[in-house]
Amino acid sequence: MLRKIILSLFSLLALAVFLPGANAVALDAAYLTGKWEINADGACGKADAEKLIVHDNATFEYGRRGKIEAVGFWRLEQNVVVFEMLTSPAYFQDIANELKDYTRHEVYSMQMMPLDMQQDQFSAVASIDDQMSRLVLQRCR
Amino acid sequence: MMTTQRSVFGVNALPAACLAIAASMAGYAPVVAAHSDGAVWGIGGLLAGSMLTKAVDNKHQSKPKQTTAPAPAPATPMTAEQKIQQLNTLAAGGYITPQEYKTEKQAILNSIVE
């Protein structure tokens, strides 16, 4: 009798593991924590990559080309991840030359809505003020 | 004094039209947020775009603008209707594909049933 119960329990466990959707990921702190590369096109570790490092203590770092360009705190609000950040000064002139004299720390709030979440990758719509962009984030070890 | 409005994500943001007008008045070219190899910067592009807008804004104001982080939104759960409206806005703006819209909407509807 006991053997039958144990076998039944194992069968249920195996069924749960192999059921479609059993490996579906949830948007939570455990999922978000880690090193992500943005628009990496499937290749982790490029020297000029754009990186988002999400820590489990609700802080994060953002950087490009090996330089940290923003640090801050993140939180989950429903299906949106909010990143409150302080940028480092004078690091964005390579994107827009008008910013070459813009040497101040600035505070920004970015909202990111993850879509199509997979174990190690998701796409997202992100916005800062009136700017909005599509991103693909890939988990990199 | 420029007013603020709710963005599609429910957080205060400056009206896009006002910022676009301010940028065009100041003669700024659109931000080209790209790597040397042509790939587009994601968050970096967003930050640079916002900085450019802020630079234009500061240029047109006599006194320096104090930058503060927005206060965290109250933690009131969104209703399924609000979430679908949010999706509708994103779909109408072309920020999500019809397939993503369908998948996300189905997930919201499923959460009602659960």
Image: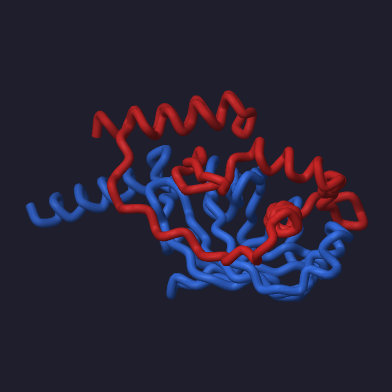
Q: Residue furthest front?
A: B62
Q: Nearer the viewer, residue A10 or A100?
A: A100
Number of numbered discs:
0
State which chain is coloured blue: A
Task: Identify which residue is drawn at 66% across, 36% down.
Answer: B17
Locate the C terminus of chain A by quadrant.
Answer: bottom right
Q: Nearer the viewer, residue A116 or A94?
A: A94
Quadrant location of residue A92?
Answer: bottom right
Q: Is residue B81 above or below residue A122?
A: above
Residue B15 appears anywhere in the view: yes
Q: Return the x and y of residue A25 as percentages of the image width and height.
A: 44, 49
Q: Nearer the viewer, residue A99 or B81?
A: A99
Q: Return the x and y of residue B31 as percentages of the image width and height.
A: 82, 49
Residue A39 appears anywhere in the view: no
Task: Identify which residue is drawn at 30% across, 52% down.
Answer: B75
Quadrant location of residue A95?
Answer: bottom right
Task: Answer with left or right where residue A115 lies relative to residue A21.
Answer: right
Task: Answer with left or right where residue A75 lies relative to residue A116.
Answer: left
Task: Identify which residue is drawn at 60% across, 71% down.
Answer: A86
Q: Return the x and y of residue A37 as percentages of the image width and height.
A: 68, 61
Task: Identify which residue is drawn at 38% across, 48% down.
Answer: A78
Q: Residue furthest right?
A: B36
Colour seen for chain B: red
Q: Residue furthest left?
A: A1
Q: Is residue A118 above or below residue B88?
A: below
How is the structure coloured here? by chain
Q: Return the x and y of residue A3 as percentages of the image width and height.
A: 14, 55
Q: Is residue A91 above or below residue B30?
A: below
